[in-house]
Amino acid sequence: MLRSYQYSEIASLGYTMQNELYREKETAIAQNYVLSHRTRRDLQAPCPICGKEGGHYFYTKWNVDYLRCQNCKSIFAVCEEEIVRGYRQEPSLCSLRSDSEYQRQISQNRTALWKEFLGWVEVRSFRFMQRNRKLNVVDVGNRFLGYSEAIRRSPLCGVYELRDSILRVESGYVPMGQADIVFYLDQMQQEMHPEERLRGMRGALKEDGLLFLGTRAGSGFDVLTLRERNRKLYPYEHILLPSRRGLVGLLEVCGYEVLEITTPGVMDVRYVMDSREELDGREEFVRSMLEDADPVLLQEFQRFLQKSGLSSFVCIIARKKKEGGENGSV
């Protein structure tokens, strides 16, 4: 397994990925839904990543409790599956995200990043499979029309199938066990049954097929520092924040070989900087560092977070193992 570092200077692009008005609307819809569908506070749940019982209370946001697993250090919300399923189907949220102007602005702000990511995928595909053209691609949960079209138009892609998406687009069909690549990007944070999902995606892959998984990580600097004050993370949009270590362990249990881990996040320090006035009183070291450090030092600190695997975004490339696997459906 390789641990790869990726550093980027395009923080401003990452910071303006979404129109502020749309972001506020999304958050308001989510908050209204959460507060009007209160989950029981006496629920107990094992860690969705490692299965261990006894997670410790970490914080509460909008009356939803989050626990931190003492074994793998993943963070997860204690919530009822029916309520989470209802959130995903919330008409006002689906309508907003399907709006043509919403999709246009997302594409306008992210096209360069999508192109850069797909170029990175081409290189890694050739490195690990010795092929990167006209592949069978399964894209799970993608809700951005521009992203879906970018993948479909990429020379990487031959047959493209979009699954579990709010988008209504023409999609091909990739039979089980015939996918060269499965994309599972920014979806795990809403997953209540990650092991079941990962086993299903394994069944979709060829013997040497690759899973590209990207998610917010519970082991990241801004997540651990801001807790409930993190404006970017909220129920039920984010109910599972796996630690990097826990995610690697789960992938191995589900029949994958982890080939590469990157922690390419560029926004951890910026997120904490923007919320520094709201920091918990126990975070005096962080507050002092942010107040006294110059931009160059803060940039170096972000670089340190990436190199140490402490950024709150993680991207993993995993290959389907040839032996001992199970087939399922995504």
Image (cartoon, rainbow, N blue to C red):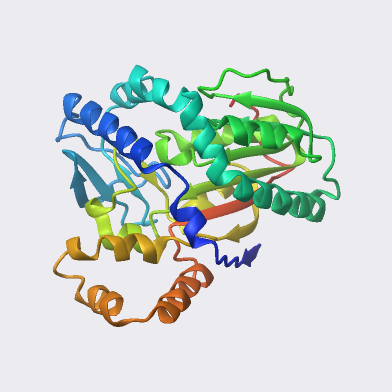
Q: Residue 65: name its quadrant.
A: top left
- Tell which of 322 and 292 is nearer to you: 292
- Tell which of 278 and 282 is nearer to you: 278
Query: Percent from the top left, x then y, of residue 236?
Result: 31, 34
Residue 268 horizontal side relative to residue 77, left or right: right
Q: Residue at x 76, y 39 (%)?
A: 154
Residue 176 horizontal side relative to residue 132, left or right: left
> What count of labels does the image hold?
0
Quadrant of the image containing the N terminus: bottom right
Q: Is residue 254 above or below residue 264?
A: above
Q: Is residue 236 visible to us here? A: no
- Tell which of 96 and 124 is nearer to you: 96
Q: Is residue 33 above or below residue 298?
A: above
Query: Percent from the top left, x then y, of residue 252?
Result: 58, 49
Residue 199 horizontal side relative to residue 34, left or right: right
Q: Residue at x 51, y 31 (%)?
A: 103
Residue 229 horizontal side relative to residue 12, left or right: left
Q: Is residue 268 visible to us here? A: yes
Query: Percent from the top left, x then y, of residue 21?
Result: 34, 38
Quadrant of the image containing the C terminus: top right
Query: Percent from the top left, x then y, of residue 205?
Result: 71, 34
Q: Is residue 111 above or below residue 35?
A: below
Q: Is residue 130 above or below residue 270?
A: above
Q: Residue at x 39, y 59 (%)?
A: 219
